[in-house]
Image: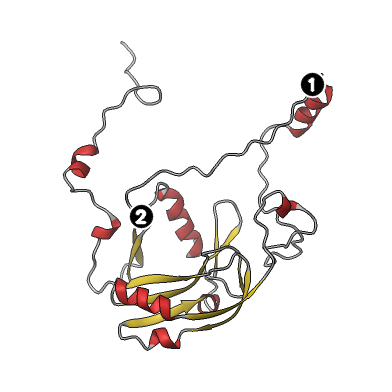
């Protein structure tokens, strides 16, 4: 018997997905239209770091077709203003007290179509009180740098995530005994693929079955499913 040929890494693979895209038959989130579907638009912060003094949604809610304006305070009542991440941290869904980066989501406008939702988002008035910002990652780690994650009890710095692989003691010993140690700072610009499809998401909840179906632009469907389960308390 001869071993079966295994294709994959290092092999030239025949592309199977091209014809439907070349013929305009690709299925995108934009193509998902459900009966009674509502649309959401986002109110975003113009500041990188600021306290939220007030959010006035009265003008937005007066627009015909705008059904709701959801804020962090609304989500807080259901303990949904923070969500778990796969890095054992928490991530803000909508802020309650302050924003921590420019263009952060501040409120969500729900409407009967996308254009009304956009008009509603433009009509929401948010009053901010600007706070000091740090745009250099090295300065952000200095002892006197403004601390962003004040939601974490006892947090006094901006060091959020620690990832360690290997044997630290052996590594330190190797450097200590080396004849020459070279240190170098390497700067790499942000690298991102140029996807044709923009970010989007459609969700449908079947009350009778207790089932949530989500269509979204993601390259990590299993990770997203896990996060949804964590948010739902599973």
Report the front residue among 147 and 219: 147
Q: Which residue is mark 1?
A: 180
Instruction: Describe residue 201's horizontal placement relative to residue 52 as left or right.
Output: left
Compared across the picture, whether 176 is left or right of 78 comes to right
Residue 38 visible in rendering: no
Residue 140: quarter of image: bottom right
Residue under the image location 75 percent in, 29 percent down: 171
First in sequence: mark 1 vs mark 2: 1
Q: Which residue is mark 2?
A: 198
Number of callouts? 2
Residue 110 location, x and y as percent?
37, 76
| Front position in the image: 111 or 162 | 111
* Residue lying furthest top: 1
Is residue 40 something that shows in the picture?
A: yes
Q: Is residue 109 above or below residue 224?
A: below
* Position of 208 relative to 189 (above/below): below
Q: How is the image coloured?
A: secondary structure
């Amino acid at each position: 018997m001869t071993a079966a040929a295994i294709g994959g890494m290092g092999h030239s693979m025949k592309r199977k997905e091209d014809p439907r895209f070349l013929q305009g038959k690709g299925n995108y989130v934009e193509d998902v239209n459900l009966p009674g579907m509502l649309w959401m638009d986002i109110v975003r912060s113009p500041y990188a770091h600021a306290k939220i003094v007030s959010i006035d949604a009265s003008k937005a809610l007066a627009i015909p077709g705008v059904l709701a304006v959801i804020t962090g305070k609304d989500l807080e009542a259901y303990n949904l203003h923070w969500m778990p991440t796969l890095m054992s941290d928490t991530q803000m869904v909508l802020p309650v007290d302050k924003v921590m980066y420019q263009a952060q989501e501040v409120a969500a406008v729900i409407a009967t179509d996308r254009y009304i939702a956009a008009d509603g988002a433009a009509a929401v008035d948010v009053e901010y009180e600007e706070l000091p910002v740090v745009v250099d990652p090295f300065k952000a780690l200095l002892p006197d740098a403004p601390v962003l994650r004040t939601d974490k009890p006892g947090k006094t710095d901006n060091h959020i995530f620690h990832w360690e692989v290997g044997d630290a003691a052996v590594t330190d010993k190797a450097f200590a005994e080396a004849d020459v140690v070279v240190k170098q700072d390497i700067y790499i610009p942000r690298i991102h693929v140029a996807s044709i499809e923009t970010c989007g998401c459609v969700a449908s909840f079947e009350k009778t079955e207790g089932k949530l179906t989500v269509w979204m632009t993601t390259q990590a469907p299993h990770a997203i499913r896990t996060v949804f389960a964590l948010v739902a308390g599973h």
